[in-house]
Image (cartoon, rainbow, N blue to C red):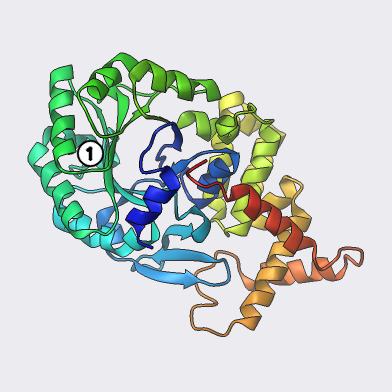
Amino acid sequence: MDTKERFAITTGGDYHGKNILAPMVRVGTLPMRLLAAQYGAHITYGEELIDRRVMTCRRVENNALGTTDFIDKDQKLMFRTCEEERTRIVFQMGTADAVNALKAAEIVCRDVQVIDINMGCPKHFSTSGDMGAKLLHKPDTVWDILTTLRRNLPCPVSCKIRLLDTPEKTLALAQMIERADVIAMAVHGRYIPQRPRDPAHWDRISEVVAGMSIPVIANGDVFEHGDFERLRNDTGAVAAMTARGAQWNASIFRHEGLLPLWQVKQDYVRHCIVTDNAVANSKYVIKEMIMKHDTHSLEGVEGKAINKCKDLHSLAQLYDLDDFYCDVIKHRTRKRAADESPNAAVIHQFDESQAKVAREHNDGQKDTPTSDFTERDELVSANTSVHAAG
């Protein structure tokens, strides 16, 4: 089954009624995407990755983790995904060149659902390379990138834009993008100079929607679950997307309402452990969660404890997940030992000293059944296996 067929099956052929995790730099790594899906997100975007870095990557099947990893020329992990998110993962790319965009997309396109081009980021790291929001003023480049990808990729292509100076300019660009045969377009309801603290212009999004026939995803100021439906209703968009709302508390995707933040952090750390996420990235995301609710929280007990964490084991201990961590490491170590394929032992963030600590810990836990990890891991997998058809 190719990616087009998978997308048609898992989304019903369109984006209607979908609640979506927006792309967020440093936040939208695999643990956050799995967490959002666990809570009900139908589609999850990865963080924006730059084409020139992705072009240097090699694809590695990480048997120990059950993931597919993309490793750059400096042996750094650029992107990690897994089978259970295959039907909902959107790979967002920063690019200003059709040839580079295609080279990068060809590396990842068979492991993701959709390739998305970032045309709305106003931050310097993106615009300095003529990417992101700079593309809004380069329609010829936009056309070249999108049509090149559509002609050559086996998967759908989408893009995400911001508002231009006038409704007429925004609609003209959007309609040109539609002619490039993209599957959908996300519209962030802010102008280029505006920042998150400025209110989103839902009315401007509705003007774009009125002139389009492809699905439009509305983005801006979704801070509670009910905002998804309100944003769709007010703009006429078929789907709604949130960034900061999910960053602060990913359980925003739950119909039943928000969970306590401590539980959300625990669930997030579980996904970090299972996917062997880099500790620096894991700490960053948790800090973003807690700073929203208390700007001085990083100076408190929890914040100081997070700063002291040097690895995932210490982070697990902080959030009462020591047993879970040790069971995962024990299981992973056994799996590596049993698998002698060339790729079995590549690309992992933890070292053997952590595995040794875990083994010693479990050797001392006489009352801990050897099946403990299996049961917990199956529970995590079951909770995170949320299909885009939702």
Image height of 243 relative to 150, above or below: above
Where does the N terminus fall, quadrant-wise? bottom left
Residue at the limit of the structure toward the right, as seen here: 367
| Residue 312 falls in image quadrant | bottom right
Residue 158: image location, x then y, percent: 27, 43
Residue 41: image location, x then y, percent: 51, 39
| Residue 306 falls in image quadrant | top right
Residue 81: image location, x then y, percent: 47, 58
Residue topped by disc 1 = 127
Image height of 47 relative to 342, above or below: above
Residue at x 69% of width, y 66% of height: 329
The amino acid marked with disc number 1 is Thr
Residue at the limit of the structure toward the left, as seen here: 140
Left of 109 or right of it: where is 138?
A: left
Residue at x 81% of width, y 66% of height: 361
Q: Secondary structure at mark 1?
A: helix
| Residue 268 falls in image quadrant | top right
Q: Is residue 140 visible?
A: yes
Relative to the observer, which residue lies in front, 338 or 333?
A: 338
Q: Label 1 crowding class (10 Å Cα cut-off): few <14, some 14-19, many 20+?
A: some
Q: Is residue 295 visible?
A: no
Left of 239 or right of it: where is 366?
A: right
Residue 25: image location, x then y, percent: 40, 42
